[in-house]
Amino acid sequence: MPMSLEFKERLSTVVQDALAAFGTPFHIYDETGIIQTCQALNKAFTPIDGFKEYFAVKGLPNPTVMALLKAQGFGFDCASVPEIVLARKVGSNAEEIMFTSNNTTREQLKTAMDQGGCIINLDDITLIAKLPAIPDLLCFRYNPGATRQGNAIIGKPEEAKYGLTRDQIFSAYGQALDLGVKRFGLHTMMASNELNYQYMIDTADMLLELAEDVSQALDIRFEFINIGGGLGIPYKPDDRAFNLEGMAGGIIEAFEAFKAKNGWIPRLYMESARFITGPHGALVTSVINHKNTYRDYVGVDASMSALMRPGVYGAYHHIHIHGKPESAPLKTVDVVGALCENNDKFAIQRQLPETREGDILIIHDTGAHGHAMGFNYNGQLRPKELLLKTDGSIELIRRAETMDDYFATLDFKPQTITPGHP
Ligand SMILES: *Cc1c(COP(=O)(O)O)cnc(C)c1O
């Protein structure tokens, strides 16, 4: 079931006012729903000492939302230097920021470790030599290869570019130990939009086993394991909700068994984005055209620049029309944006109530990997972001892009070189 009925209800009562004040298109995020999910996650894992969620910034890199998440005790998983800058901007300290990059440069590692630092999570054994200094705490990303099945979106681990092999994991921690690293973490990220919670339990089991093997081989202990993100959300009306309690129960059991056997226990870190904010965002867009050719098209004022998932992955995002009863007569349509790119469709051959120009379409589940993925191809500008707060007010938390933003990279000092003439 996409978008909660509560959010649908809250949005429905304010959408006309939001429209009047801000105009479409916009993404709107539901503070109430986000906080509820944060609290549910923290509650589910309270039996594990030192549980911490590091929200994957790439899902929703908006400082206002990030500040909200931080207030719920979350840290941030960052894949780039600008994401680290955002995490620092909302007041996160070094231990609250995890730098999970791949194909990383020396310069990026240096910037990450300077200015307060963060937890460095290396994606490859060769990166140890590229660290500007030896950190106190170091983490590596494990790729289990053929020993684990991948999930539908990420694919097979052995074909994924991320992480170290099992053999490399042992030598990497050995090298780190020799170099003077004192604290250790172990990370993996295997799934994307996975609704089967057993997969996440298997991932925790896998990391605990590896942590045990490495700690015995090298006589070290792990301060934490990070099982990554990838918890799914129900995008389709028939999808079941992710069973958070089921997952937590299995993982808590695995941690208790580990403690009974080893006498110590690592902390548990996770780094979801989609599960935390995905269902709590919607893209609100107005119908501007109808076109009837070989198919019937509903043209809206948002395009792929606002939401790429349908175009890139063929992803399903549920749509309802504001104020139209579910019982209205249905029509099969494609819902399209304005790009000269035939992928620019929010829905393909979808049954929707008949619309008129000016009707408001609510596209569900855009709270993660929505606005953030938008691009400027075809001169399409990215829309604004709003926050529907717990007190019922609506705050603009990012303005829409302007033409000046689009042209900003054309403002530079002219420079021409003639090769061969230094
Ligand atoms: C994208 C990403 C995440 C978050 O993925 P979700 O599917 O949104 O939970 C977490 N960790 C890393 C390393 C990622 O690249």
Image (tube, rainbow, N blue to C red):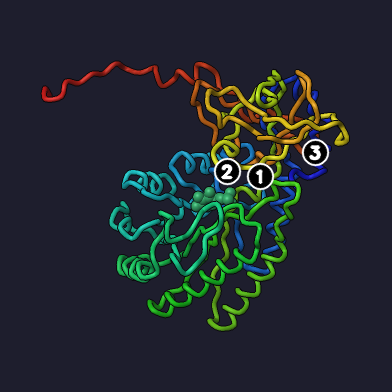
Mark 2–mark 1 CB contact (< 8 Å): yes
Q: Secondary structure at mark 2?
A: helix
Residue 313: give x, y in percent of width and height: 56, 42
User: Which residue is tagged 3?
Assistant: 8
Q: Is mark 1 within 8 Å of ligand 1?
A: yes
Q: Is residue 386 left or right of residue 150?
A: right
Q: CA distance from mark 3 to mark 1?
A: 14 Å
**354 up-or-down from 281: above or below:** above
Residue occupying the point 82% across, 36% down: 10
Q: Label 1 crowding class (10 Å Cα cut-off): few <14, some 14-19, many 20+?
A: many
User: Which residue is tagged 2?
Assistant: 59
Q: Label 3 crowding class (10 Å Cα cut-off): few <14, some 14-19, many 20+?
A: some
Residue 51: give x, y in percent of width and height: 61, 62
User: Which residue is tagged 1?
Assistant: 278
Q: CA distance from mark 2 to mark 1?
A: 8 Å
Q: Label 2 crowding class (10 Å Cα cut-off): few <14, some 14-19, many 20+?
A: many
Comparing 33 with 299, the one in front is 299
**Amino acid type shown at disc 3:** Lys
Instruction: Give the total of numbered labels.
Output: 3
Q: Earlier in the sequence, mark 2 or mark 1?
A: 2
Q: Secondary structure at mark 1?
A: helix
Mark 3–mark 1 CB contact (< 8 Å): no
Residue occupying the point 56% across, 72% down: 205
Q: Is residue 93 visible?
A: no
Residue 421: give x, y in percent of width and height: 11, 22
Q: Earlier in the sequence, mark 3 or mark 2?
A: 3
Residue 341: give x, y in percent of width and height: 53, 27
**Amino acid type shown at disc 2:** Gly
Q: Is mark 2 within 8 Å of ligand 1?
A: yes
**332 up-or-down from 81: above or below:** above
> Residue pushed farthest bottom?
261
